[in-house]
Image: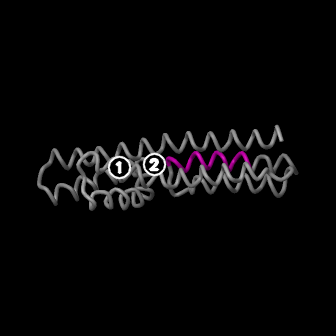
Amino acid sequence: MDIILWLIVFVTFILGFAGIIYPVVPSVLMFWVGFLVYNFFIGDELSWMFWVIAAALTIVALISDVAANSYFVKKFGGSKRGEWAAIIGAIIGMFVYPPFGVLFVPFIFVFAVEFIQIKDMNKALKASVGSFLAFISSAIFDVIIYIFLIIFFLLDVFLY
């Protein structure tokens, strides 16, 4: 039975990483499912320090996704409407030609919104590049956070 439960933990971690590319999969939630399966069905309880670190990293990951979008679109000359277009585009992009829709739909949405507002193709393109960089940087940051989550989990499981 333990092998099946460990397999579930492993699969939830893989799904967590897959959620970076396929945002319809709730990445960080998948890691928490794995942690909870271990905690309640496999081994001893995870330490309170693990739960504090996991909660903090989860909050950082969630905030960083939105913050990166806002930061990069603004930094590249986008407007508040452009920021919203990137967010809406990412949501719609999950369902349009995954995983590439998450990259291209926000890019197109930001470009369209910015071009309609300012009528300058170069500035609209620059803001669109910002939305693309936001996704890339957020994905890289998420991978780092998720690796730390797994490291802390494994340390807690095997050392304490």
| Membership of 11 in magenta stretch | yes
Which residue is depicted at the point 86% across and 51% down? Answer: 44
- Extent of the magenta region: 9-21
| Left or right: where 158 falls relative to 142 | right
Q: Is residue 4 left or right of residue 145?
A: right
Nearest to the observer: residue 30 or residue 138: 138
Q: On screen, 53 above or below 89?
A: above
How many labels sit on residues? 2
Amino acid carrying label 2: it is Pro
Q: Secondary structure at mark 1?
A: helix
Front position in the image: 3 or 74: 74
**Farthest left residue in view:** 119
Q: Position of residue 32 (x, y in %)?
A: 68, 55
- Percent position of residue 140, x then y: 49, 40
- Give the label on residue 71, or none: 1
Identify whether 64 is placed above or below 91: above
Residue position for label 2? 99
Of helix, strand and loop, which mostly describes the magenta segment?
Answer: helix
Residue in view at x 85 percent, y 51 percent:
42
As drawn, is 2 to the left or to the right of 68? right
SS of the residue under disc 2 = loop
Q: Is residue 16 inside the magenta stretch?
A: yes
Tag 1: Cα neighbours inside 10 Å, few (<14), some, or many (≥20)? some
Q: Position of residue 126 (x, y in %)?
A: 23, 44
> Which picture quadrant has residue 86?
bottom left
In the displayed structure image, the side of residue 116 where residue 19 appears, left or right: right
Q: CA distance from mark 2 to mark 1?
A: 23 Å
Residue type indicated by callout 1: Tyr
Q: Residue at x 62, y 49 (%)?
A: 15
